[in-house]
Amino acid sequence: MKKNLILFLLLSVYTQAVPQRNIINVPDIPGYRTMVCDFHQHTVFSDGTVWPTVRVDEAIREGLDAIAITDHLEYRPHESDMAADRNRSWQIAKEYAADRGLIVIAGTEITKEMPPGHFNALFIHDAEHILNKDFRQALKTAADQGAFIMWNHPGWKVQQPDSTVWWDEHTYIFNQGWMHGIEVINGPEVSPEAISWANEKSLAMIGNTDQHGPFMFEEFDPDDHRTSTLVFVAEKSEGGIREALFNGRTACWYKHGVIGKAPVIRALFLASVTIRPLDAENGRYLFYNPTDLDLRITLSNTVYEDWSKELKLSPGSKTSFKIPPGASVEQIGVRVNNMFSGVDKPLEVPLSMIQPVHQ
């Protein structure tokens, strides 16, 4: 009896220690599967305040599919207490996540003054070899390791307090083929300039938390979530993520909105919403959003005055609307007010493109 009690207590402690995975319902798009990722986080091995395993537990608890550990190369304020090389945080997280269904990508943050600022290098083999006082040599070494390289928080006020500038150094880096993505969202902060550069230069749009402390102390709204990158992969694997990033199949999911290239967010929206006739003869229809995306839409035919009001399609919700007499579904447009392909460019699609459900 005593042995059974001890076993029960041990199992209880273990069960409490393993986080329960949240299920995030973001739909796949045609031809690809959707993965929810965060590619910018820190631990005590640079200027973070948590052990690498905490980052794994947080990601599992919040339903992420993949994370990258990107501790600073040059800035390690705990170095006297953490006697290890610059690959150690990833190694610890990778081993801990091995049987937990989370992909942990090897990465590092190349940390330079502006210009050119900070860059994350993902899918690296050895962070120690990337360390170099010359940003050119550091980025070249990362690229030689096959890294996906992104410019972090270009509008960070500490480095660009007055205006967000694309410097000559960034042109050099881009022309060398050493910049593949750009952080258009860092934590809660959106960079309009980065959105424009991503579109102009065909850079992957990335949204990350850049988390340093534990998430347990973050204050989120009840219906909010951590900033993430949605990656649309051919296969759910590290290699699938890498291929998708290099081909720019991403969108940034933050607070109540999504930012991404127009074809991607169009496909994501159309996979997220269905339309069902309630009383087609009298023009009554129903929108249904079975996903965890918060969608806010306006119907664009101004004949019907009620359409000036925004329709809120909260996760899992249904919203009815009425088409005015004489109008048809083919004549109506939909503007998604919180899905953007560019600065002040909300997604617009014909209502007729939304999948009908006849039941």
Image (spheres, rainbow, N blue to C red):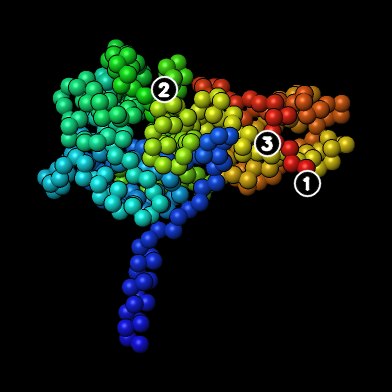
Q: What's the CA distance linking mark 2 and mark 3? A: 32 Å
How many numbered discs sit on the rendered protein? Answer: 3
**What kind of residue is marked 3?**
Leu
Q: Are marks 1 and 3 in contact (CB under 8 Å)?
A: no
Foreground residue among 46 and 175:
175
**Residue drawn where x is 21% and y is 35% of the image:** 127
Earlier along the polypeptide chain: callout 1 or callout 3?
3
Answer left or right for 25 relative to 204.
Answer: right
Q: Secondary structure at mark 1?
A: loop
Amino acid marked by disc 2? Leu
Indicate the amino acid at tag 1.
Gln
* Residue 274 against residue 217 in the figure, above or below: above
- Few, some or many C-alpha atoms within 10 Å of disc 1 (few <14, some 14-19, many ≥20)? few
For residue 359, which numbered disc appears in the image? 1
The residues bearing labels 1 and 2 have C-alpha atoms spaced at a distance of: 42 Å
**338 vs 140: above or below:** below
Q: Which residue is mark 3?
A: 311
